[in-house]
């Protein structure tokens, strides 16, 4: 009988990771324990993934509010700074904002609307339309926003982010002024010094600002690129991908992960005789159709992965074959014809082939990272390691 199970994604429990732990040894040991305990059979191209959080923790990749303040002060001179396009998040941005505010005299905070970059809504789209507001051109002061929309709280967190961020800036000793706009250049009448906090559009934002006459432009990816007083850092992503650790400390996105994934791959090969693929994952790349939140607040889904995870899926669409190519077949004849088509694949790209139309055009690491993120969750499951079997199998695999 043919095998019934296809892809299986399993959360693997692990010890609580602390700075200095041998993470490669812990991950390998946790996978081997799970295989033994649950009677699993390891295979080549099984996937082992670990969340970026435990990697950063093992690295001790942390910085403080004061470290951020020192870097911001050094880059902007301690004067007025336009802080534009932050996400609405107590976990992701509030501690960063504290450091930014401590590093300057005044913050002109420019929020995008009706939502931030990852889908947290300040206002309802229908309400915005009713008020005749054009988000592509209208620049709103805080007073105008309140006049039109009142005091709006986030539906999930219950936070009025305009009020929350203003209070936070003031508590750090800086003056706060709030405006709302979606064109980065709208901040320039207020200040020529700009810190842009957008994640995936950051390079375009910097280009537009500089072309429009901004004098000092830095992104969050350029803050904490180097150690401050012995702190952690991320030479590529700076503060992007960071999370709140304590009220005064931030866990940065992990750095230098490639050696780690290759070490885990090597240890698993030595222990099992199977060449597994290994990756570090952060936020998955998916959007909630009800809450409207796009999950990807990290700069990338995967900062490091082994070579076998490079590329995109190269698959045939079974329903296309069933409804078109083999529409006259059914039962075992249909099954055998589809299996034969899959077996005829020779590794060349199927892009443009009608039989592959509708397959997900995303990178493997983004797809697998999303699967991992959904499996591990972000709460108290205690499974920061994910073990996936059957991901690269297809309908012909027995």
Image: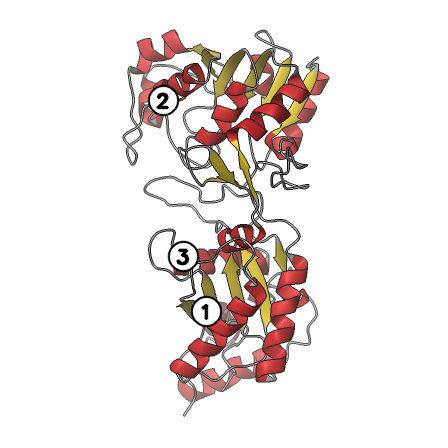
Do we see residue 328 in this rendering?
A: no
At x 54%, y 74%, the residue is 46
Mark closer to the chain start, 2 or 1: 2
Q: Which residue is mark 3?
A: 374
Do we see residue 195 in this rendering?
A: yes
The nearer-to-camera label among 2 and 1 is 2
Q: 10 Å neighbourhood of mark 2: few (<14), some, or many (≥20)?
A: few
Q: Is residue 102 above or below residue 157?
A: above
Mark closer to the chain start, 3 or 2: 2
The spot of residue 366 in percent (x, y) is 55, 55
Q: Which residue is mark 1?
A: 319
Label 3 to label 2: alpha-carbon separation = 29 Å
Mark closer to the chain start, 3 or 1: 1
Q: Which residue is mark 2?
A: 164
Label 2 to label 1: alpha-carbon separation = 50 Å
Q: 10 Å neighbourhood of mark 1: few (<14), some, or many (≥20)?
A: some
Q: What element does badge 1 sit on? A: helix
The nearer-to-camera label among 3 and 1 is 3
At x 53%, y 82%, the residue is 339
Q: Is residue 30 left or right of residue 147?
A: right
The spot of residue 11 in percent (x, y) is 40, 66
The spot of residue 45 in percent (x, y) is 58, 75
């Amino acid at each position: 009988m043919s095998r019934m199970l296809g892809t299986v994604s399993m959360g693997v429990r692990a010890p609580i990771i602390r700075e200095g732990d041998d993470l490669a040894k812990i991950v390998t040991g946790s996978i081997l324990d799970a295989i033994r305990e649950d009677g699993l059979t390891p295979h080549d191209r099984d996937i082992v993934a670990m969340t970026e959080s435990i990697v950063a923790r093992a690295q001790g990749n942390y910085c403080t509010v004061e470290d951020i303040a020192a870097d911001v002060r050094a880059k902007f001179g301690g004067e007025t700074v336009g802080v534009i396009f932050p996400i609405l998040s107590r976990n992701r941005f509030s501690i960063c904002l504290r450091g930014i505010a401590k590093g300057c005299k005044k913050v002109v905070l420019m929020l995008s609307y009706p939502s931030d970059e990852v889908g947290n809504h300040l206002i309802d789209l229908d309400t915005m339309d009713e008020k005749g507001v054009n988000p592509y051109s209208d620049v709103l002061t805080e007073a105008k926003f309140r006049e039109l929309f009142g005091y709006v709280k986030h539906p999930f967190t219950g936070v009025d982010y305009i009020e929350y961020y203003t209070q936070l800036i003031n508590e750090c000793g800086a003056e706060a002024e709030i405006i709302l706009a979606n064109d980065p250049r709208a901040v320039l009448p207020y200040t020529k010094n700009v810190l842009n906090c957008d994640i995936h559009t950051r390079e375009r934002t910097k280009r537009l600002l500089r072309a429009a006459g901004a004098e000092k432009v830095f992104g969050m990816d350029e803050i904490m690129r180097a150690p401050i007083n012995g702190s952690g850092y991320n030479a590529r992503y700076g503060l992007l991908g960071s999370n709140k650790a304590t009220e005064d400390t931030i866990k940065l996105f992990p750095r230098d992960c490639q050696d780690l994934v290759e070490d885990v791959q090597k240890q698993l090969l030595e222990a099992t005789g199977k060449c597994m693929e290994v990756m570090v994952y952060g936020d998955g790349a998916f959007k909630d159709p009800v809450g409207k939140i796009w999950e990807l607040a990290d700069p990338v889904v995967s900062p490091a992965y082994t070579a076998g995870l490079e590329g995109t899926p190269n698959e045939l669409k079974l329903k296309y074959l069933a409804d078109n190519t083999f529409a006259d077949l059914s039962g075992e004849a249909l099954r055998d014809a589809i299996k034969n088509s899959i077996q005829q694949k020779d590794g060349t790209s199927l892009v443009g082939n009608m039989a592959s139309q509708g397959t997900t055009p995303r990178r493997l690491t983004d797809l697998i990272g999303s699967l991992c993120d959904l499996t591990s969750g972000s709460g108290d499951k205690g499974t920061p390691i994910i073990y996936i079997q059957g991901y690269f199998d297809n309908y012909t695999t027995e």
